Amino acid sequence: MMKRRTTLLFLPLLLAACSENPEDGTVPAASPFEVSIGSGARLDIRARSATRTSLDEGGEEVRWQEGDRLTLWARNSASETVLDGAAFTLYHYNATYNSASFRGSIQPMPEDTYTYYAVSPVPASTDGLRAGYDIPAVQDGAFHGEWDVMVATPIEGAGPLREHDKKDANGISDNTDVVDLQFAHKIHVLKIAIPRNDLGEPVSEITLTFPSPVAGRLTVDASDPAADGVLAGSGNTLTLRFSEPKDAGAVVYAMIAPLTLGEGETVSIVAAGATSESEPRTFVPATADRRFAAGHTTPINYNIPAAAQELTRVTFRLAETGINTLGEAIDTFTVTAPEGWTFEDDTRSRTFDVTGTGDYTVRFRSYTNPTEEMAGFQVTYDSEHALLTEEFTLPAVTVGGETVVEFRVPYLFEETFGGITDFSHDDNLGTGATNSGNNTAVDLSGYGLSGWTGARCGASAGKAIRICSRNECAALTRGSYHGRIDSPDLTALKGSCQIVVRFNYSINRNSNQGNVLQPYLAAGITDTADRNTTSNLWGSFISGEGDPGTILQYNIPAVVYDLNDSGALNGSFDNIPLQGEFSTTASASQRLVWEVYMKSGEPRAFATYYYSNNWVYLDNIRVSIAQ
């Protein structure tokens, strides 16, 4: 069994003085200390032995690597927890990998005697000194340090970690006389070599089926390194799914919870390529090898047999990862099927880790789902800042063949108005008399714009939307009535982040006197207040000159304003060539807004009345996360 020598070093930060404050008599709060933890080699498992071996025997090397983390507890003489799962991250190791340093922050420890406990890596969950780790049922064939669960022997009767004069060359306090950890591994490793491949194609995945669970939530007790971990889960099947297909000569690894096979129990292995699945093979360990013990490795030579059957394949093809649409690459996508359709593991959902563009294929040994075209599927794209879901239809499936579904990662928000229907709400009032129209916004969901609202707006079916600012001057009195539209909430956002909004626009004007004035467009983002379509704040009344700095709802300044066409006034539903763009910070409860206004009133004339409709046409609205 590999024992890992670990030392803890003390790195002081600038600390506040411990003297009382002379003004109020209080003692300033103590500053935390940086504590560094040293240890030996860890990852890069390299098995040279042909027989079962512990992780450090037979020439195997286990090394720490960048990003590894540890967790430390300390309890005092009264059994009170002083350090409660403090995390430490690797920041140095030497050239021969026989020592490494980890650092983490702790509060100063009072004088007392302590018991120290440690586990590695940092667990997914803790309950007192119990630490939980997730051992996945689908792995990629590589050795993963985050699943290499270890528990250290508790150190009893030790003093506190402290800053003192015993320092190394870098001025770090040495506490090796206080804490010296020895770790024990709690998982088992399978090393699978492929000497020969008779499948006729490279192998995309290998599936091992055990008589009892080997994957799930493994819980260990930091106070008892000799105790077996407790596995919660029903994962008898372990699948190695490779990002790059494997062929003869390859070596892959699997990490499982320890188990012991009973008399007559076996492990079955089957391999699959892009189009076919191999004949199954059974691994029957010798009597002495029935125990897949913690901290040990079982080598398996797997000569892949010939194909037994053609597989039915459903391939989800990702042309790009979201950089050019969403604005950032997705981490995963999840396909969810409707009732009546399941993946081969009898679930209706499958999540794929995105490693880049290309094909993500699901293989069926026995396809029992409907073969005809089927609607109601969903794909959910998950990135750092966004979570987007779209529906799609699965094409007809050919049993024994391949069905391809093309996926395009969407924009954070997009509206091209292809599904809009004709409507007009006070966007084209007559120019023969005073008529300010209605300031109240209307719900546009009934026109193919779900979640949109607008005041003084209209649309041409399948083309675009327009917003109108009504401008009047009668009996020397001016009136300017803004038009406005609001998008749905940006619900795809996980939190607040910077976004980029791009759109096309054009401008036109209709006046009873034929005079030329320039309409303007402003765009921005609302606050998080609830939408109220009955409020006349949605369509503004301004007598005299407009104020472009405060034209949006609740006097929110526009992000961009005074957008114009330099007097061209040639916009229409079929001519929207100008490009607008702005960046802003947004969250899921905010909406995009566009508002049309006039900076100049109609001419004042005693005997001449002026009435005009001033339009801005919008199309191709696309929103991305700012890179």
Image: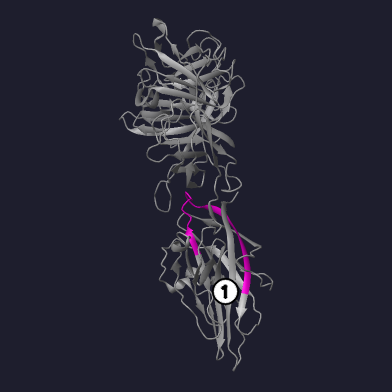
| Camera sees residue 213 | yes
Vertical side of 393 occupied by 187: above or below: above
Vertical side of 5 occupied by 569: above or below: below
Give the residue at the far top of this rendering.
287
**Quick one: quadrant of the N terminus?**
top left
**Residue 232: x %, y % from top left:** 34, 27
**Residue 486: x %, y % from top left:** 49, 64
> Is residue 343 highlighted in magenta?
no
The residue drawn where x is 60% and y is 89% is 604
Vertical side of 58 occupied by 611: above or below: below
Q: Quadrant of residue 75?
A: top left
For the stretch drawn in magenta, the main secondary structure is strand
**Front position in the image: 307 or 138:** 307
Please report the bounds of the magenta region as a residue range.
486-508
> Is residue 488 highlighted in magenta?
yes
| Camera sees residue 142 | no
Give the residue at the far bottom of this rendering.
607
**Front position in the image: 228 or 521:** 521
The residue that label 1 is drawn on is 597
Q: Would residue 570 appear left or right of 397 to someone viewing this image?
A: right
- Identify the amino acid type marked 1: Tyr
Vertical side of 34 occupied by 230: above or below: above
Query: How many labels were placed on the picture?
Result: 1
**Residue 466: x %, y % from top left:** 56, 68
Q: Would residue 576 appear left or right of 99 to someone viewing this image?
A: right
**Front position in the image: 294 or 270:** 270
The residue drawn where x is 53% and y is 12% is 303
Local crowd size for mark 1, using a 10 Å CA cut-off: few (<14), some (14–19), many (≥20): many
